[in-house]
Image: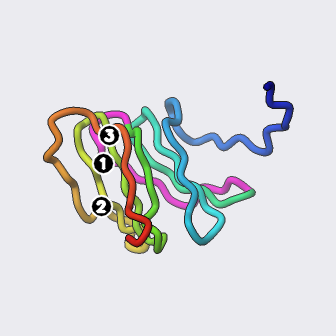
Amino acid sequence: AEYMGKVGRAFKGHMAAVSRVAFHPKIPIVATVSDDGSWKTWQMPNGELVMSGEGHKDWVGGVAFHPRGSILATSSGDATVKVWDLVNERCTHTFTDHSQAVWAVAFHHTG
């Protein structure tokens, strides 16, 4: 079946393809990750950039919000997973035990 809907809004901000989108569990914010190695959060529906982060050394392919919404996790082609504290706007932990690219990341529904 062909999709006949309209695109509501295009957000411009990444320098390369967007790999994944995650929806905040409590408020109207989405997170995007990109082949440019960054992540960004956007306010919905106006598309205003809220925050962005860099720190991976390769593409970022996975993103997930913690169920409480104050933590974001990202995974990358650099074989790392990073945990970001959105309140203090910093990376709090980098998991480096993978030997190959990490394509996705998720939190347990209870946190």
58 falls in the magenta region = yes
Could you tell me the amino acid type at mark 3? Ser
Residue at (38% x, 39% y) in the render: 60
Instruction: Say if 94 sits above or below 59 in the image.
Output: below
Mark 3 in CB contact with mark 2 (< 8 angstroms): no
Could you tell me the amino acid type at mark 1? Gly
Residue matched to label 1: 55
- For this orientation, the residue located farthest to the top is 2
User: Quick one: label 2, few (<14), some, or many (20+) residues within 10 Å?
Assistant: some
Front label number (3 vs 1): 3
Helix, strand or loop under label 3:
strand
Residue segment shown in magenta: 46-59
Residue matched to label 2: 91
Residue at (38% x, 70% y) in the render: 111
Tell me where residue 37 appears, x and y as whole percent: 38, 39
* Residue 30 or residue 109, whichever sits in front: 109
For marks 3 and 2 on the same chain, the one whose residue lies earlier in the sequence: 3
Mark 2 in CB contact with mark 1 (< 8 angstroms): yes
Task: Give the CA separation, mark 3 to mark 1.
Answer: 10 Å
For marks 3 and 1 on the same chain, the one whose residue lies earlier in the sequence: 1
Mark 3 in CB contact with mark 1 (< 8 angstroms): no
Instruction: Left or right? Give the position of 94 relative to 47.
Output: left
Residue matched to label 3: 76
Could you tell me the amino acid type at mark 2? Cys
Residue at (16% x, 47% y) in the render: 96
